[in-house]
């Protein structure tokens, strides 16, 4: 048998501006010969093409006053690629003066923006959404390199973000185009002498702080509602994910929003975070992340807060559940993006009588998960940082010392941790309560649904949860009993679709997200009362 490999099809790389992803296909002929074809796809890289303005030298600029700028600090922050563990990108370490300037401009520009007709605001958002989708490749490439998100999922995140922005525009024109009309004589002691008109007005300057795991999607989930409602916005992107955010912001720049309406201030949260969140120019904070949000809430003062924080989403499995359905949802819910999702399943609470079968089914699927770099679309990719990997390892070691059953061997190379199911986890183990944010999933065996509910409700978190059963009556009772913002029946927890209300109870958050809720949250009610000299129904 003769075998040819046609490598000439590989174009010569242009190092600075493009990267290539290649795929091999084997064609077999009747004669028994084989030809291996190499398909190549050119990927536009960070800071090139339409994005060329946002970088100078090897440091990405920050965005303020409608311009891309270098910080006067002369300092930069390095972004380490979780896969190579080498510096991939650098961003400006912005100063307090630069924050002041961005806030000042945001305040001024917002006044004009609030007077811009709603349909025009919507038109610009639709334009930004289209540009975002058109230029998705470079943004997705940043996500691969900054946060090791599998390549396909990175593209999905950008496209989903474009759709979210468009939906905000559409929802906004309807929601904000309506108000209320009240008459005074419905309240005891009043005649119909007052007509009350209500409308929604913007809050002013929104400070938006998203986390590393969905830096683009969780940034636009704040930007879209803020802008359609007539606010201006200052974005502080997560360090890992900052370059993806800068590219995304450039799409809004290209759409032609007024100068200074959006700015993007880069720097470490630990260095400029307090200055931003306690800044007197801020009228609302929309934050998504971990416990940092709790600290921000305590310091923020008299501004509305939207806090979407951590979770320990429980998955309760009853005896009558479809165990194949549960197993596939456990894989999707527990291991997608290597468990680094706020709504990942973070503890399985399964009835003892079906636990062996479920664990066996899940193990069979875990064995099929691919582990490797995000560029290869591996199911499990390196976690975001060495400190995250060390934290996860600490939870695993603690479970080992306290006698958990390891369904797979614990394996780690750098930031890459192989998927691991821990069976027979007991409440004295840290993994029973803490959020690993990695591909490690504990199983707690229970003897009643009440025991599962009790464990779920004993957690400080209350983001989402799920219950698997064929009995809808039981599912409803359990859903009502679980103290979590959302309960999914017969499916893994999930944040989307993005227009669904999404909220955490207890330490998982304040307020509710989802497009409609975010628009409402970023506005306040204004009323105008028309006072009549005599009751309106006395004439005629
Ligand atoms: P994180 O460490 O809390 O960081 C979130 C954001 O806060 C980042 O932009 C970070 O910037 C910034 N920050 C850090 N210190 C700050 C300070 N003192 N003041 C203001 N901002 C500050 O969270 P993460 O590790 O990025 O994300 C993982 C966590 O987010 C998990 O707990 C996950 O459950 C949660 N999460 C929740 C949701 C939800 O909707 N409920 C969604 C996704 C993720 P730097 O990167 O520069 O430090």
Image (cartoon, rainbow, N blue to C red):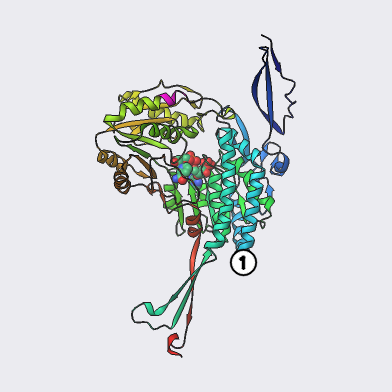
The furthest residue to the front: 30
How far across and down, in percent of the image, does residue 191 sit?
39, 84
Picture residue at 59% right of the left edge, 41% below the top: 242
How far across and down, in percent of the image, does residue 309 sit?
43, 45
28 to the left or right of 521: right
124 to the left or right of 196: right
Picture residue at 45% right of the left edge, 90% below the top: 539
How far across and down, in percent of the image, does residue 305 sit?
46, 55
**Residue 203 appears in view:** no
453 to the left or right of 393: left
Instruction: Tell me the quarter of the picture where residue 367 sits.
Output: top left
Q: How many marks?
A: 1
Front residue of 222 and 507: 222
Front residue of 130 and 218: 130
The furthest residue to the top: 1
Picture residue at 49% right of the left edge, 47% below the top: 497
Instruction: Tell me the quarter of the picture where residue 458 sits.
Output: top left
Front residue of 90 and 321: 321
**Residue 213 appears in view:** yes
How far across and down, in percent of the image, does residue 345 sit?
40, 37
Picture residue at 64% right of the left edge, 41% below the top: 136
Q: Quadrant of the N terminus?
A: top right
The magenta region covers 364-370
SS type, badge 1: helix
Local crowd size for mark 1, using a 10 Å CA cut-off: few (<14), some (14–19), many (≥20): few
Which residue does the numbered mark 1 point to in the structure image?
115
């Amino acid at each position: 048998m003769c075998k040819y490999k046609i490598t000439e099809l590989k174009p010569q790389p242009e190092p600075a501006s493009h990267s290539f992803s290649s795929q091999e296909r084997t064609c077999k002929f009747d004669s028994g010969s084989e030809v291996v074809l190499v398909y190549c796809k050119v990927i536009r890289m960070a800071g090139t093409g339409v994005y060329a303005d946002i970088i100078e030298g090897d440091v990405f600029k920050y965005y303020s006053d409608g311009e891309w700028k270098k910080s006067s600090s002369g300092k930069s922050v390095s972004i380490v690629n979780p896969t190579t563990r080498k510096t991939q990108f650098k961003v400006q370490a912005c100063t307090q003066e630069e924050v002041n300037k961005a806030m000042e401009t945001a305040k001024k520009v917002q006044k004009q923006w609030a007077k811009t007709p709603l349909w025009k605001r919507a038109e610009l958002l639709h334009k930004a959404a289209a540009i975002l989708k058109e230029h998705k490749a470079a943004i997705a490439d940043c996500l691969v390199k900054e946060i090791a998100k599998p390549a396909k999922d990175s593209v999905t995140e950008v496209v989903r973000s474009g759709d979210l922005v468009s939906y905000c525009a559409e929802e906004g024109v309807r929601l904000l185009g309506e108000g209320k009309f009240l008459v005074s004589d419905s309240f005891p002691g009043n005649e119909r002498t007052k007509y009350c008109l209500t409308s929604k007005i913007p809050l002013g300057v929104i400070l938006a702080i998203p986390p590393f795991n969905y830096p683009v999607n969780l940034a636009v989930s704040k930007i879209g509602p803020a802008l359609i409602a007539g606010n201006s916005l200052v974005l502080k992107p997560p360090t890992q994910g900052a370059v993806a955010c800068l590219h995304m912001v450039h799409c809004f720049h290209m759409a032609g929003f007024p100068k200074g309406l959006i700015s993007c201030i880069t720097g470490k949260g630990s260095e400029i975070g307090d200055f931003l969140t306690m800044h007197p120019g801020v009228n609302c904070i929309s934050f998504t992340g971990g416990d940092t949000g709790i600290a921000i809430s305590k310091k923020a003062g008299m501004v509305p807060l939207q806090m979407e924080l951590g979770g320990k989403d429980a998955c309760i499995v009853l005896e009558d559940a479809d165990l194949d359905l549960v197993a596939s949802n456990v894989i999707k819910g527990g291991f997608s993006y290597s468990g680094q999702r706020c709504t990942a399943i973070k503890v399985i609470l399964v009835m003892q009588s079906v636990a062996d079968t479920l664990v066996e089914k899940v193990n069979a699927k875990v064995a099929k998960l691919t582990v490797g770099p995000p560029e290869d679309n591996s199911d499990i990719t390196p976690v975001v940082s060495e400190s995250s990997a060390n934290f996860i390892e600490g939870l695993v070691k603690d479970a080992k010392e306290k006698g958990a059953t390891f369904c797979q061997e614990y394996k780690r190379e750098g930031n890459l941790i192989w998927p691991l199911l821990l069976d027979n986890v007991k409440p004295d183990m840290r993994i029973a309560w803490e959020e690993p944010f990695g591909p490690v999933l504990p199983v707690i065996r229970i003897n009643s649904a009440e025991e599962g509910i009790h464990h779920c409700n004993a957690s400080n978190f209350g983001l989402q949860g799920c219950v698997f059963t064929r009995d809808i009556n039981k599912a409803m009772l359990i859903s009502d009993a679980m103290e979590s913002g959302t309960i999914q029946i017969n499916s893994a927890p999930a944040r989307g679709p993005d227009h669904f209300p999404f909220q955490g109870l207890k330490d998982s958050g304040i307020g509710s997200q989802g497009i409609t809720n975010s628009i409402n949250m970023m506005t306040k009610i204004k009323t105008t009362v028309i006072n009549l000299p005599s009751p309106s129904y006395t004439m005629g």
